[in-house]
Image (tube, rainbow, N blue to C red):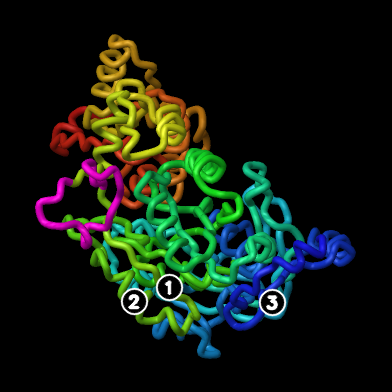
Amino acid sequence: MSHTEENNKAKLIEPYGGALVDLQVSESERQELVSVASQLPSIRLTSRQICDLELLATGAFSPLSRFMGKADYRRCVEEMRLADGNLFPIPITLSISKDARPKLDSDVALLDQRNNLLAIMSVEEIYEWDRDEFARSVVGTVDQKHPLVSELVHWGELNISGSLRVLSLPEHFDFATHRLTPREVRQKLELLGKPNVVAFQTRNPLHRAHEEMTKLAMSSIEGTLLLHPVVGMTKPGDVDHVTRVRSYKSLIENYYSPKTAVLALLPLAMRMAGPKEALWHMLIRRNFGADHFIVGRDHASPGTDSKGKPFYGSFAAQELAIDRGDELGMKVIAFDEMVYLPDEDRYEQTKNVGVGTKTISLSGTQVREDYLAKGLRLPEWFTRIEVANILAETYPPKNKQGFCVWFTGLSGAGKSTIAEILTVLLAERGRTVTLLDGDIVRNNLSKGLGFTKEDRDTNILRIGYVASEIVRHGGIAVCAAVSPYRETRNDVRAMLPDCAFIEVFVNTPIEVCESRDI
């Protein structure tokens, strides 16, 4: 670094708790531990747990330095704090099944889904936890329509905790120059020369309203922007992270000054916890060097519950973030909905728009159904042309998109017969269709499986995975399977893009099914 660069460095806010946690071992220690780890019992982490481990390892969750032990967990779910009193609104735990229970005071190797070694944990605590209590305390509901609640059924009954030695961070081969640790982001922000940094959390493409919002926020603090999209786990059905990051790159390169903005990717597994998640996002961004945070309407909301009501109030996240922001050392920049004023060719918050002023806006549903689904280009007042082109590439017109029709019902209900007829009719109309019949799949993909709940679930998830790949490539998957468990069908639904899963219950009387039984 030159003397000029050193002199231009800005003093950023310190990490929450005073210092960044760093759990990564040295290269020499790593080489020694690799041979040791091969002799240890192992735990294969889920995608969510891998995201959590990466952010623990690099200090993004500072001052938390491990998956939570019982004292941290209890105080977190009850008071949004760690045992030492530091604010921490979302539990970070490593759950395992009882069958995988390790021995206390022993080491276990933590592996990714390809069995690559990531870390070694010294198991110091093993404790039980309650799913319903977790759901009510963290996301405020036990409604199965909440994506995290529906996922909890697959979490293990036990949590384990202990000191971590991280040998390797998870491998990412995409957008390598933007996959930056908290320390690396801080270095980039310091070189921009301004102490005030506003962070923007996003899991969707950026349109003109978001662009104006971020530029207004920067101007209001005379600072710089950390554009920090989530590329770990978001809401099922969200735009894929590759499409989103492509759009962010096009905006950063063409519409922001390189002296005012940094784009970095965050491998976070979101909980969609609304107000509590907003606080959590603020804590994380402080560790990356930001001292201001943008909170809009419905921050980190999963939408509506099974009765059609919003899980959280539109401004609940803003209210909690403002109330607790000072304790985190973060200032909240709250925005209302941004609308376009066509007569003035600019964007404004609805609260600042005068009575009778003409405004226009587009909802996410309108973007998908009125434009992308019909092959129409998004208007330039709504989004930059570069972003419109990227979205058009990813989302072809409705008649060229893939989808899955999932027939469920009793054996003998007529699922396979109806599925075969539908397959022929769709093919007749020029679509590429694959029929995945439960019995046929059992003879190929699932040979050897029985009819226990576990084996049934495995069979259904295999069919779902194949269907999701077909749909992802623009084909139609017609599936017919006895799939009696709602949570397993929901797991398949979560594998597919939003609105691409059509569930059909073939409601044949049991007497008719019995008469057809072979």
Compare marks 3 and 2 and give the one earlier in the sequence.
Answer: 3
**Residue labelled with disc 2:** 320
Crowding at label 2, few (<14), some or many (≥20) Cα neighbours within 10 Å? some
Quadrant of residue 148 within the rendered picture = bottom left
Query: How many numbered marks are there?
Result: 3
Which-is-in-front pick, marks 3 and 2?
2
**Residue labelled with disc 3:** 163
Is disc 2 in contact with disc 1, using a CB cutoff of under 8 Å? yes
Which-is-in-front pick, marks 1 and 3?
1
**Residue labelled with disc 1:** 279
Q: The residue tagged with tag 2: helix, strand or loop?
A: helix
Query: Residue 386's x, y, as percent?
Result: 46, 33
Query: Residue 424's x, y, as percent?
Result: 29, 13
Compare marks 1 and 3 and give the one earlier in the sequence.
Answer: 3
Query: Residue drawn 30% across and 36% down?
Result: 368
**Res. 451 visible in picture:** no
Q: Magenta region: which residues?
A: 340-358
Q: What amino acid type should be assigned to the residue bearing mark 3?
A: Ser
Query: Residue drawn 81% across and 65% down?
Result: 3
Crowding at label 3, few (<14), some or many (≥20) Cα neighbours within 10 Å? some
